[in-house]
Each structure stands twice: as C-alpha cells, then as structure tokens.
Amino acid sequence: MAKVVCVLYDDPVEGYPRSYARDGVPSLERYPDGQTLPTPQAIDFTPGELLGSVSGELGLRKFVEGLGHTLIVTSDKDGADSVLERELPDAEIVISQPFWPAYLTAARIAKAPKLKLAITAGIGSDHVDLQAAMDRGLTVVEITYSNSISVSEHVVMMILSLVRNYIPSYQWVVKKGWNIADCVARSYDLEGMAVGTVAAGRIGLAVLKRLKPFEVHLHYTDRHRLPEAVEQELGLTYHPTVESMVCVCDVVTINCPLHPETEHMFDDTLIAKMKRGAYLVNTARGKICDRDAIARALESGQLAGYAGDVWFPQPAPQDHPWRTMPHHGMTPHTSGTSLSAQARYAAGVREVLECWFEGRPIRENYLIVDSGTLAGAGAHSYSAGNATGGADEAVRFKMRAPGSDSN
Ligand code: NDP
C-alpha cells in the first residue's frame, strides 16, 4: 500500500470557512484549445469549496484511504525537522502546490527511496529538481491548463492596477482621504501602449486575447511561433528574442516556465534595455527575475511598477525586498488558486491518482518527466536541469512568521 504525502498551504487564520461568498462556480466543459477538463471517475468534494488548504485535503482522503493507502496532509514543509522531511523516507507519492511548494531537491529525492510520483496540483513543476527526477526515474506530472485562465485574468487585473495606479488610490479611501492629485500623479490609460508577453503558451495567449479589446499594440516572444492566423487575428508582432521585444514595450508580462533557460532572465542588463517607466508583471515564477535588480529598478524609476504573485523562495521571508520596494502590487501566490481553479486541479489530481493506482497511463499532456526524460508538456516547455537552488531559504519564513512556534 502506498503512502501519499500531500503538502498544502495553511488554513485561513480565522478558521476553515463554514460558508462561502457564492453558491458555487460555473461548470466548464472544455479548455479553449479543446482539451477536456479533468475526468476522474468520481469526486468527493463540492466545487467552489476551499480545497487547497490543509483541511480541504484536495478532497482526497475518502478516495485514498478507501483504497487502503495512507494519506498524510501537512503544511510543514521546510527544514530538516519538518513533517515533509520526516515522511519522505516512506513516501511513494508527493503532491504539492506551487503556491506553497514542497521543494523536492536532489537531497530530498535521495532521502525518499520509495518515491515514484510527484504531482503538481496546478501548473509549474520547477519546485522539483527535474534533473534529479530524471536521473532517479521519477514521474513528474502537473494538471495542465487547470489554472491557466485564472492566471491570465490576474495578469490583466495587475496590468490595469499598475498602469492606472489603483492600489495607492484604494489606500487613500481606506485612509479616509480624497486625495485625487496624489492618486492620479502616476495614473495613465493603457490604450495605445505596447504590451508584450514573454511566452505565448496557454497563459500568454489568453492574456493577449483578453487585452485585444483594450486597443493596445500586442507583442510576443516564444521559442515556437504562433500560427499566422492567430498572429493576424490578434494583430501580434513576433520578436525572436526577449531583448528585441522589451525595448519597444510599455508593459511586459512574463508567462514562461522557470527552467535553466529562463532563470534570472530579467536581470540588470535586460531591465536596462526596457523603456524607462515600463511596467513588469510576473505571475510565472519569482526566480525568472533577479530579486535585487527588480528592487533597484523600482527605486531608480527604470521600472514604473512591478506586480505579480510569485516569489523565491515561497513563502517569502519577512525581509524579502519585494515586500517593501516602491510601486509594487505584489500578492502572495494566489492567481492560480482561486476556488474555481482549485476545483479543476483537485479533480485533475484525483484523475492522476486513479490512473496511477489502476496502472492506466496518465494523460500525455500532464507529463513533465517520465521514464528518465522530459515528456509530454514538459518536453515542449521545459529544458533539462535544476531550478530549485536556494530553496532551503524558505525555512526563514517559518523561523520568523508572526505567531509561528519558533518566533
Ligand atoms: P504552457 O506550457 O502552455 O506555456 C509555456 C510557454 O513558455 C510555452 O509556449 C513555451 O514555449 C514558453 N517558453 C518556454 N521557455 C521559453 C523561453 N526560454 N523563452 C520564451 N518562451 C519560453 O504553460 P502555461 O502558459 O499554462 O503556464 C506557464 C507558466 O506559468 C507555468 O510554467 C508556471 O510557471 C506559471 N504559472 C503560474 C501560476 C500562478 O498561480 N501564478 C499558475 C499556473 C502557471 P514552447 O512550448 O513554444 O517551447
């Protein structure tokens, strides 16, 4: 029988909800490219409920225990004395969400001799050392498309928030002011600006489609070019390199995976090539940007604003400079874990587990690593190597978190 270790973010500080703001979430049949939504044989949760935190258990307990397997659910993931580290030696399956990533470094994989399957409940498996996973013959899967549209909506929200100076204006209301000049001294219209995406995969393309009605000039760069008909329909300008794109854009949004090719792509050198006063929105992965270069660019005015929900490591230590740098619109990692998205990726995890336990193949487009190599979606979008370096620093949040045991 298998031990399944599931690492989820903490419950709300005010307790697991007893009721919800709405009575459900819309049910979708297909993703925009025709791919079907997850098709588990059954689910043991109500879509629209909080599934991504510890008490939600991704709705898995009845199913996993019903088959005689063991399910451990914890948020305690960092440091040598964490529940995750204690459970790893017996674990066959580790489930983790990118929002609260269980970093599976080479050292941790070595401590888990029975580990066979790492499931990302969501999209983005950079918290797993993919090179070590390939070398060990692990299977790594993610729930492709489950939250791509969720993120694209968040990107559009953040672009508008930055350009129109929404967050400081909201804060003037909360502070009981009516300070119009303070609000508008950094507020512009998006109309007419040039907006570019690094990558036009599922999220990047959805962002481009959502921005088209805003009458902006749309640009993109990607390893593979989109079909000509799509470029024409959306009026896209393609750039073979990120450098040639950023120098003409007022707003840049990052929508590629983190892998060795993209790590620290936005460093001092690339940011210096951007227009002065450009906005940068990163909901892809924190490490695609050089942490200190971003803070420096906001201080100097080279960037007019930076927003996103992804950090490195996660959770971000209390003294992470992105918490305090000027003109930022950062949130914790939330864009892909709306209640709507949780229902899809929880169903996707259930589908993967059903396949695994019944010895049926997992959908090709959920695969990232399989049989010692990049596979499925992973073969298309990732490159071999490791992007988990420095993940150990996540333990610093635990050491200093308000209310934490170690405080
Ligand atoms: P897709 O796989 O559909 O798209 C990724 C795209 O990135 C592909 O088109 C790929 O190109 C492109 N790409 C890869 N490397 C490069 C590179 N070096 N330069 C330019 N383009 C590159 O994934 P999604 O759009 O669904 O998700 C993208 C990423 O967003 C995820 O990997 C994850 O990191 C992040 N994400 C964040 C979430 C959040 O909650 N904040 C939630 C979901 C995802 P090609 O395939 O053409 O080679």
Image (tube, rainbow, N blue to C red):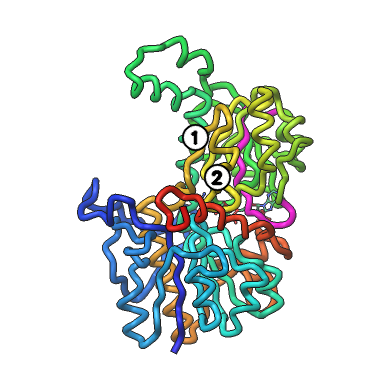
Q: Residue at x 59, y 52 (%)?
A: 313
Q: Residue furthest bottom?
A: 1
Asked whether, in this view, residue 320 is left or right of residue 225, the answer is left
Please state the horizontal and vertical placement of residue 238, each as a whole percent of the image: 70, 39
Q: Are marks 1 and 2 in contact (CB under 8 Å)?
A: yes
User: How many numbered markers are drawn?
Assistant: 2
Q: Nearer the viewer, residue 160 or 239?
A: 160
Q: Residue at x 60, y 61 (%)?
A: 127
User: What label sits on residue 158 in the rendered view?
Assistant: 1
Label 1 Cα crowd, 10 Å radius (few <14 / some 14-19 / many 20+): many
Instruction: Respond yes or no on whether mark 1 lies under 8 Å from ligand 1.
Output: no
Asked whether, in this view, residue 384 is left or right of residue 113, the answer is right
Please state the horizontal and vertical placement of residue 25, each as a whole percent of the image: 29, 52
Please report the bounds of the magenta region as a residue range.
248-262
User: What label sits on residue 389 in the rendered view?
Assistant: none
Instruction: Respond yes or no on whether mark 2 lies under 8 Å from ligand 1.
Output: yes
Queried whether the magenta region covers residue 254, the answer comes back as yes
Q: Which residue is mark 2?
A: 283
Q: Residue at x 30, y 77 (%)?
A: 62
The amino acid type found where label 1 is placed reads: Met
Q: Residue at x 46, y 85 (%)?
A: 2
Please state the horizontal and vertical placement of residue 123, each as a whole percent of the image: 53, 59
Queried whether the magenta region covers residue 253, the answer comes back as yes
Q: Compared to 338, does 210 lie above or below?
A: above
Q: Compared to 87, does 346 lie above or below?
A: above
For marks 1 and 2, the one nearer the N-term is 1
The amino acid type found where label 2 is placed reads: Thr
Quarter containing the N terminus: bottom left
Residue 150 makes an appearance in the image: no
